[in-house]
Amino acid sequence: MSKDLTIFPGKGRELSTTLGALNIAVPVKKVVHRIGGHTAGIGSLAVSADGKHVLTGSADRTAILWDMNSGASLASFVGHGAEVKSVAFSPDGRYLATGGGDHLAIVWDAVTCERVKTLAGHTSWVRSVVFSPDNRYLATGSGDHRTMIWDIATGARVRSFDTGANISAVTFSPDGKFLATGGWDKTATLWEKGSGLRVMTFSGHAREVRSVAFAPDGRSLATGSGDRTVALWDTASGIKTMTFTGHSSPVTCVVFRPDGKQILSGSLDGTILLWNTETGQQTQSHAAHDGEVKAVAFTPDGEHYLTAGGDGRAFVWVAGTGERDREFSGHTAAVDSMAVDPTGNRLMTVHAGGNATIWDIANGGREMSIVGGSAGITAIALGPDGNMAAIGSADATIIVREIDTNRVVGSYAGHTLRITALAFSRDGKWLASGGLDSEVFIHEVEGGERIGPLSGHRFWIRTVNFSQDGKWLATGSTDKAVIVWDAASGRRLFAFKAHRFPVSSVAFSPDGKWLATGGCDKRTLIWDMATGGRIIDLLEHEADVSAVVASADGEHLLTASADGTVILWEMRSGAVVMRYQGGNSQFTSAAFSQDERIVVAGSTDGQVRFWDRETGELLATLHNLDAGFLWTAPPDDAAVSGWLWTDRPAIVHVLRCNEDGTNPEALAVDAPERSVHLELYNRKEMVMCRLNNPEKYHREVERIVGTLQANWLETYGARLKNKQLGHKETED
């Protein structure tokens, strides 16, 4: 039971602990909103012992804590430098653990969501983490052939087992005395936790053991294998008692139902199968994900089970019927590529799923959705008038579409494999294309003339770009080379070879005096177009450089990287002018706004961020939704969790938490606090004003704070009275 009452926090402090109109004095909490969800495949999940929470780990390098009943995202855990391979709850619910591709395991406080311990010692991916039943230890299994046991209180390594093979899975026996591991040597092994001695080896699989699970009574062990089978073993004798066959691809995960009567298995074939442990009969089978099933779990009461997949989604299913009950999702897709219309009115994004969206930057709405079909969209470009969109697909086709009318202007042939790069000339008359076939073509947009193929690269083309005057075309390839061509004839003029890895982006200076090239070797190189020599190397990025963009005056260069930063450089000195941070994201594209007041970048976390170029302040974020639109603006004195502009308020997670952000809990869909919060903070004028007129926005904030405070007290107080909550405790 809770006696907390939430009121509007203005200017970073609480207004009062008393609602005068209701004459109630109560401790104060705050209501906040979150936009949460994974933007890459989910490889692991766990359910808390009380069944109230779900934890998922993803290839997007984050773990997310979800409310089981509402599906709301409660908190994100950012700390790994690579994919989160495994997640776990401690039995008492005090801690969470994550294991990552960065060779680390991290222990987190479940209430504060803060990092408690970082456990370093493995030299390869930490594929599995599990707490001991007494909450004192954490076991980790790794691709370095070792399983380690750590003391949670001290962070010290208590024991290490050298198993002799890559470890896929680790689990404690129900009594905590033993540890079972599964590995790529085709076996599972039982270890005594106290002594570290090998007790038993379970041999019989034809391929690697990817998952292990103890029965609730500890008398049986289930294993899932790359040989597409699930096996059941007697832990006393080591004898295989049952083999379950039915999957058409490797089995990735297995788990017992809490009563021990059934085993659930998931596979790379995208299906889950439910087995009766007494008869060996398959009792349920259905497709669960578009792609592989990476993890499965039961709720503590056994009434539901959960699945997580490479499609970035996690589901709850009714165990008795196999019907899908709910989903944990952020409804966003990674931004594979992005183009900003030179007129400043439109933005085009390509989703990881192969579809594209055209967004209205001025009003925030979704202007057009373009379905890529079975082939999928693989490259895009926007014309200089902002009304032409070039779309390349995996089936080697290219079309140019007029956005206002949706009319197809033309289709362009020549390539034999996937289209990988597109660019319009500055006058919009020509379109350059590069493909997986290593060829380059220059297409006349209206007349149908085609120049090419421009042959010279040995591997596929990653980037194409015209010079400002349209005389030159630069192309960059996986072969590490940059070639400059005469755009009128297709004749090869120059070749630059200095990158150590593929070239991902090229950009000419407006006057054509230099060419910038960005590569997967973390470097941006500047070339003199008159001499062919290198002018300067820009070396601040720590991962692939995905985009290079010259400013209109040629004085500055913008670079985006998979290291989560966008950098503005001064070309004369090579000095860093500003860094724009993206947290845990990996940037795939970047651009200036038309007036170059704003820096724009798209990333793998499904967001397009807009920063003030001069100050580096984040102005707004566009979330790359699967339908509808969602914009957010950062927190300020008037909005402690920021502003929203969306036509899909149902996907916004509204939470109540302590003033310091700890102990988040999801509000029910019909909770008065939730509806009032969304009414107050889902405001187009605030988000779009902050993006398009930040000076006016900051002038308005002071006035808005007072207005919102008054509205909050009046509206929420009235709803409390109507719901007769005035003097009653609110049940959580």
Image (cartoon, rainbow, N blue to C red):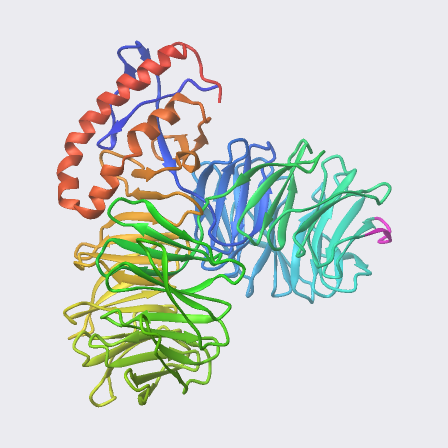
Q: Position of residue 129 (x, y in %)?
A: 59, 51
Q: Tell me where residue 470 sits by quadrant.
A: bottom left
- Residue beneath the point at 59% across and 47% down: 308
Compared to residue 436, the image places residue 498 above or below, namely: below
The answer to whether 238 appears left or right of 17 in the picture is right
- Is residue 585 or residue 110 the one in the foreground? 585
The answer to whether 156 appears left or right of 545 in the picture is right
Q: Tell me where residue 52 sits by quadrant.
A: top right
Is residue 363 among the parts visible in the rendering?
Answer: yes
The answer to whether 162 appears left or right of 561 in the picture is right
Specify whether residue 237 is painted magenta.
Answer: yes
Q: Position of residue 197 (x, y in %)?
A: 74, 57
Compared to residue 458, the image places residue 193 above or below, namely: above
- Residue beneath the point at 69% across and 67% down: 164
Q: Position of residue 259 (x, y in %)?
A: 75, 34
Q: Position of residue 493 (x, y in %)?
A: 29, 89
Magenta region, residue range: 236-244
- Residue beneath the point at 37% across and 24% down: 673
Compared to residue 506, the image places residue 588 above or below, namely: above
Q: Residue furthest front?
A: 447
Is residue 195 among the parts visible in the rendering?
Answer: no
Specify whether residue 706 is painted magenta.
Answer: no
Compared to residue 590, the image places residue 274 above or below, namely: above
- Is residue 231 or residue 198 the one in the foreground? 231
How many marks can you see?
A: 0
- Residue beneath the point at 39% across and 34% down: 649
The answer to whether 486 appears left or right of 105 in the picture is left
